[in-house]
Image: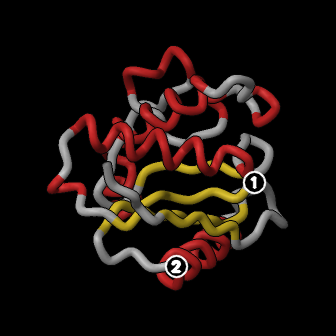
């Protein structure tokens, strides 16, 4: 049994729901997460995307964890932030040291809540769900998205 410290910062919802990733890293800090949330606000505003900024992080070393431990960590973190989530207010996704599988676990955790629907349908509360979830609004091309964006 182990306890982990996690953060979720909503910088702005002025332009729409707060959106941003969740990173898993041994050196995650609240200041770092707050800075990334502010940068997401600016990034969305500069390209005129109707979202605000948010970001999250969990202090952990994912390289030292089994897949099941990562799943349990992800599901626990997701359940903890559910009160601030929803497609109309807050939309998390994966970031450093996690991936499409992490987002799938987030969707699974939201779906397992007794009544997640006041926050929006679980698959509407996350960006870039994996390709295997395309039938329930997953995204084709997520794994390549950042590289394609840089290339363009």
> Residue 15 location in percent, x, y?
81, 62
In this view of the protein, which residue sits in the foreground, 142 or 148?
142
Q: Residue, x 75% and y 70% (percent of image)?
A: 12
Q: Residues within 10 Å of mark 2 (few under 14, many from 20)?
A: some
Q: Residue, x 72% and y 63% (percent of image)?
A: 52
Query: Vertical placement of 53 versus 73: above or below?
Result: below
The residue wearing badge 2 is 30
Q: Residue, x 15% and y 55% (percent of image)?
A: 64
> Residue 151 location in percent, x, y?
32, 61
The residue wearing badge 1 is 17
Residue 126: name its quadrant: top right
Q: Residue, x 37% and y 39% (percent of image)?
A: 72
> Residue 134 location in percent, x, y?
47, 21
Residue 63: name its quadrant: bottom left
Q: Tell which residue pokes out farthest to the front in this image.
A: 1
Q: How many marks?
A: 2
Please give left or right for residue 39 compared with residue 114 in the image: left
In this view of the protein, which residue sits in the foreground, 74 or 87?
74
In this view of the protein, which residue sits in the foreground, 120 or 143?
120
Callout 2: helix, strand or loop? helix
Please give left or right for residue 77 compared with residue 4 in the image: right
Residue 25: name its quadrant: bottom left
Q: Tell which residue pokes out farthest to the left in this image.
A: 64
Callout 1: helix, strand or loop? loop
């Amino acid at each position: 049994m182990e306890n982990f410290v996690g953060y979720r910062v909503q910088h702005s919802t002025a332009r729409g729901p707060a959106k941003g990733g969740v990173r898993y890293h041994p050196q995650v800090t609240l200041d770092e997460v707050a800075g990334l949330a502010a940068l997401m606000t600016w990034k969305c505003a500069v390209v005129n995307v109707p979202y605000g900024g948010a970001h999250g992080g969990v202090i952990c070393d994912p390289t030292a964890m089994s897949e099941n431990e990562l799943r349990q960590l992800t599901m626990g973190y997701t359940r903890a932030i559910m009160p601030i989530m929803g497609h109309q207010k807050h939309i998390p996704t994966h970031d450093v040291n996690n991936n499409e599988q992490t987002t799938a676990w987030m969707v699974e955790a939201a779906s397992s809540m007794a009544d997640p629907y006041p926050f929006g349908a679980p698959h509407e509360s996350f960006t870039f769900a994996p390709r295997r979830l395309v039938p329930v609004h997953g995204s084709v091309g997520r794994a390549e998205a950042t590289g394609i964006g840089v290339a363009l």
